[in-house]
Amino acid sequence: MTQHFRRFVIFAEMRTGSNLLEATLNAIKRVTCFGEAFNPYMMGWPDKDELKGITMAEREADPHRLLAAIFDKPNHLPGFRYFHDHDPRVFDAIIEDRSCAKIVLTRNPVDSYVSTALARATNQWKLNETETPIPAAVRFDGAEFRQAVGAIEEFQLRVMHRLQVTGQAAFWLGYEDLRDAEVMTGLLHWLGRTDLDRVEPASDQVPQNPRELSEKVENFDEMAAELARLDPFMLRRIPNFEPRKGPAVPSFLGSEAGRGLVFMPVKGGPTGSVTGWLRRIGPVAEDFNQASLRQWKRQHVGHRSFTVLRHPLLRAWRAFESLIGGRNAELRDLMRRIHRVPLPPDQDLAGLDQGRKAELLAAFLDFLRRNLNGQTTLPTSPGWASQSELLAGFARFGAPDMVLREADLPRDLSWLAASAGIGAAADFPGPDAFPDFLDDQDLRAAAKKAYLRDYVAFGFAARP
């Protein structure tokens, strides 16, 4: 057997056909795909909390131990599937390993999005020939779609760039390739298994939703109108999408008042109150992509762009509130089991008193410190990422003219409006209200440990 690679990784995403590809590979002798080995919520496959004798807690402490265990398989071709939201700590080791074959699997992002929504609605993630698909239809959420595609696109552009920089090539697959025996044979030959005359795709899985999109999406016409705002020629391959770094450009708002204002919101900041102020001073344009925003700027000579920073402790509190009050039950469970944030059962969260919230926030801040230092399985969420990093993402498209602070908005927004030729701007109501216990000295110290970069970069005081 002539083998060019000693291992492999499949860069894919949810509902791209990665389960089918894994099944095809696992049917080949001396080839093993270990599922989503670095998915923060499981070990390879659902309901598994151990892989290669390593527990989730042990993987959390040292993910490279699991990476070495997976790859330690002599006379074998081992690998795993890696998605954009899997443990970022192993990415560099994977991408720089020239003996690790890189397989990139993509699918039309609209099909992937709808398929994911249907799987969540029915809890049916795989289908074999003996099972009956659960009929369902879902609603298309344009904002959610743009956010999901933006995150995946950013990751795949990163993969493509790193491969170019290191002089490596990947084997690119589309969803429709997975049932093509000739393509699967070519893949195995590329991996070095030239001893195989023909590789048949796995037959134990069938398409779950072979209906037309109009039958699977309740608001199909609304979805079509939303997608019409995007360039359809960019929808085939996610890596060819126009880059949107940091918070996606579609989250930006353009006020038509005066010469124009562009608000570039930092997730977790005072977005709601600033958006309300913008709407009170005039019409607001939204749902931008990079091309349409550039065109808007050309049409608004003299415009001003701005973003608003929030004190790191207050922003961490908003992220914590979202954690305990949102629909992300899986994330809460992971915090309890792996990340040392001892949240009570979900049914008890609504009854937490202020003292208990302060204790849990302290544990959450310790998690944030580790997460921002690249010491956890979970990728850094935009809702709690450092504002320094988010502004660096803005700068890759266009840095804001002005970086304002939430506490100073009643004064600074009037000046900002005047600089854009807006004569009589609406008053700003003032900063959002926060609980008094956030002034606790220990919480202030924990926030500074987690967000030291922001404190230094933006001069935040210890007290919000």
Image (cartoon, grey):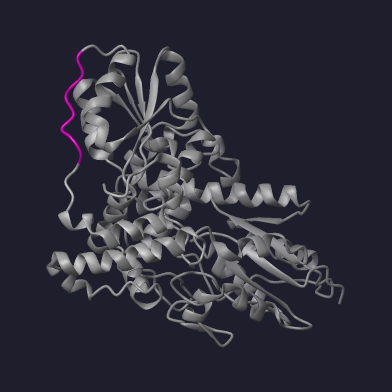
Res 122 seen here: no
Magenta span covers which residues?
Answer: 424-431
Secondary structure mostly seen in the magenta stretch = loop
In this rendering, is residue 116 above or below 158? below
Q: Quadrant of the N terminus?
A: bottom right
Q: Position of residue 137 (x, y in %)?
A: 32, 56
- The quadrant holding residue 338 is bottom left
Q: What residue sits 56% from the left and 35% below the top?
A: 233
In this rendering, is residue 245 above or below 138? above
> Is 373 on the left-hand or right-hand side of 313?
right
- The quadrant holding residue 414 is top left
Residue in the foreground of this view, choosing between 167 and 393:
393
Q: What residue sits 46% from the left and 34% below the top?
A: 230
Q: What residue sits 38% from the left and 55% below the top?
A: 448
Residue in the foreground of this view, choosing between 358 and 219:
358
From this viewpoint, which residue is outermost toward the bottom?
53
Q: Position of residue 446 (x, y in %)?
A: 35, 61
Residue 428 included in the magenta stretch of the image: yes
Res 23 seen here: yes
Q: Position of residue 258 (x, y in %)?
A: 30, 13
From this viewpoint, which residue is outermost toward the right?
2
